[in-house]
Image (cartoon, rainbow, N blue to C red):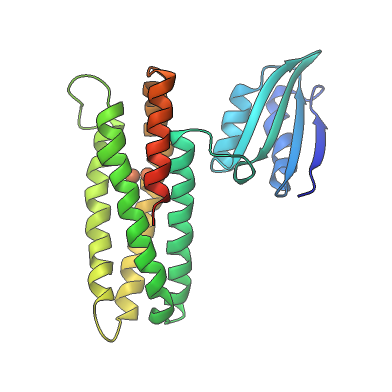
Amino acid sequence: MEQQTTTLDLREERSSHLQSAAFYTLKEMARGQTVILLTADEPSLVMQSLNLQFRHNLAYEIAAVEGGWQVDVRRREDVAVQDVPDALTRDHKRLNALLGSAIQYLNRGDAAGAAPLLHDLAAVLKRHIEVEDGLLAPLLAPAGEQPQDAPQAIMQREHGEILAQLLLIEECLTQDPLPAGELAAYSSILSGTLAKHEYREENNLFPQWQRALGRKTAEEQKEIMSRVETLLGEG
Ligand SMILES: [Fe+2]
Ligand SMILES: [Fe+2]
């Protein structure tokens, strides 16, 4: 793939305008492209907030250079999976894409077209929840009793809700003829529940897990990462 690089010099930009100045260039960033941002001040906070605006679709590296800072930004899908939160976040996108395509078929009344996508979704979603609940939660939970509103406790409760909504879809899939209207209704409910759940995980839980991972040895981190990738990649 041809590597294209664009440099945006923001060193003269007022700090209050930095984010919006970078936003439009990053919005146009194509696959395979690198955008280099030059800033006068340390840009970690600006980059975190931009990445939130782009729903974590940016991968970037910050380096101190003469006269300021340089940030090399690429699209996340252009770089190798970086860590456990990255692997889970990419799996969220895969789930959203499957469910989104199924809903498009259902909105046209084409339940037969949606069915294989919904079967895939069920398999990927159950595996994803198994990785979060079965593998990661026990390994990365904060020590001691967890309050009801702790990010991990919220995650586990929401998984129960998500699996119950998925079960309604799976029951519809066993019927003949397939009930397109019911499938459309249940799929759109699940889509809303998933979107909120993923947002909470990516912004509240995964940073906590990332800190817990940072307290493990390099060996343990590698082992956990490889188990996550194997489990998510199966099937
Ligand atoms: Fe989850
Ligand atoms: Fe998740």
| Residue 95, above or below 174 | above
Residue for point 26% across, 74% down: 172
Q: Which of the pair 157/89 is nearer the observer?
A: 89
35 sits left or right of 216 in the view: right
Residue for point 34% across, 54% down: 125
In this view, the residue farthest toward the top is: 66
Q: In which quadrant of the rendered image does the C terminus lie?
A: bottom left
Residue for point 67% across, 17% down: 42
Q: Which of the pair 66/18 is nearer the observer?
A: 66
| Residue 120, above or below 225 | below
Q: Quadrant of ligand 2?
A: top left
160 sits left or right of 192 in the view: left
* Residue 220 spot, x, y in % from top left: 38, 24
| Residue 156, above or below 109 | above
Residue for point 33% across, 78% down: 181
22 sits left or right of 97 in the view: right
Q: Is residue 57 visible?
A: yes
In this view, the residue farthest toward the left is: 145
| Residue 97, above or below 113 | above
